[in-house]
Amino acid sequence: MLTLVTGTTGQVGRRFVPRLLAQAGPQERVRVLVRDAARGERFAELGAEVVLGDLRDEAVLGKAVAGVDAVVNVAASFRGVPDDEAWAVNRDAALDLGRAALASGVQRFVQVSTGLVYGLGRGRPLTEDDESRPGGGMWGAYPAAKAEAERGLLALAGLDVRIGRLAFVYGEGDPHLAQSLRWAGSWAAGQRLQMVHHADVAQGLLRLLHAPGVAGRSYNIADDAPVTAVELHQLNGVDVPAALYERTDPEPFLQMTSTDRIRRELGYRPVYPSVYAARAAGAL
Ligand SMILES: NC(=O)c1ccc[n+]([C@@H]2O[C@H](COP(=O)([O-])OP(=O)(O)OC[C@H]3O[C@@H](n4cnc5c(N)ncnc54)[C@H](OP(=O)(O)O)[C@@H]3O)[C@@H](O)[C@H]2O)c1
């Protein structure tokens, strides 16, 4: 079995690939798509095949999927990029990759998505059957493009697509936990962020990749204990601004997702059920 992984130079992919390789049997191989040859060397050293190129280049997609059995599409463009790039990578290139995979006989396609696709809150934890409702403070080209990519991929008849919707990812030196203050600094004191540690992102994606009989299913991947804006400041060793206590949380369940489905159907159990468990284990 040959698995193609995209986005491996990013925060999620660089931590996922070593775990994918670590659990691979003797017949299982991994190929990565990277844009920069020098940044691909690390993956070659780990034992992966490296294909060079940009996801928006259809000729590259053909090379990347040739002979592949499964794809894990981790790549995305969302960190401070213009909207046209967010659409081009997160929707158009993801769909082109899905079509290339289908044409090449790929059997499984895991699409890495985001809990932001739900948009507006619904006064309770969001389940995978909830439709995307555009809007809310975090809505924009990125979640909109990811939501359309999900729909487009699931509509590709003949391709076994599985969607993993990640919460806010942190851990293992990822600066994301510190960056959370960019948002949490303007929240109400009790407003919560749902997170997931890199170890559990990898666990979730591996379960999606290997599970039989879940074609067309979507799964939320998150931990058990969303943290408040106050705790995010404390975790980062930053004084809590007084203004947080003057605001009220407009929607306590905004972007809170249920993990019931992935627990029940795929046996997912967070290694780090909370950021405090990860901190105690030295895994921040
Ligand atoms: N981090 C989170 O909190 C979070 C939360 C929810 C969902 N997600 C999802 O998780 C996935 C990974 O996120 P991340 O945090 O690892 O993002 P990241 O650190 O920004 O990494 C993005 C990856 O995608 C690659 N990429 C971007 N545009 C590309 C293109 N045109 N062609 C080829 N590769 C391209 C980047 O390659 P270069 O290094 O060459 O730029 C990089 O490897 C994404 O699908 C994202 O939507 C992440």
Image (cartoon, helix red, strand yellow):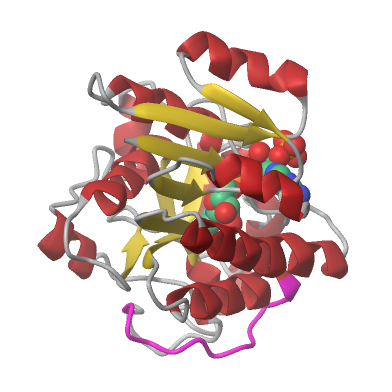
Q: Give the residue drawn at x 30%, y 43%.
A: 206
Q: Nearer the viewer, residue 29 or 117?
A: 29
Q: Give the residue drawn at x 66%, y 69%.
A: 91
- Magenta residues? 127-141
Quadrant location of the N terminus? top left
Looking at the image, is 128 positioned above or below residue 270?
Answer: below
- The stretch drawn in magenta includes residue 257: no
Q: In this view, does 8 lie to the left or right of 167?
A: right
Image coordinates for residue 95, horizontal then vertical, percent? 61, 68
Q: In this view, does 151 lie to the left or right of 19?
A: right
Q: Name which quarter of the figure residue 78 lies in.
A: bottom right
Image coordinates for residue 85, horizontal then vertical, percent? 83, 62
Q: Which of 182 and 209 is in front in this view?
A: 209
Q: Which secondary structure dominates the residues rendered in magenta?
A: loop
Q: Is residue 183 left or right of residue 217?
A: right
Looking at the image, is 113 positioned above or below residue 170?
Answer: below
Q: Nearer the viewer, residue 87 or 161?
A: 161
Q: Give the residue drawn at x 37%, y 72%.
A: 158
Q: Name which quarter of the figure residue 116 lies in.
A: bottom right
Q: Give the residue drawn at x 58%, y 59%.
A: 100
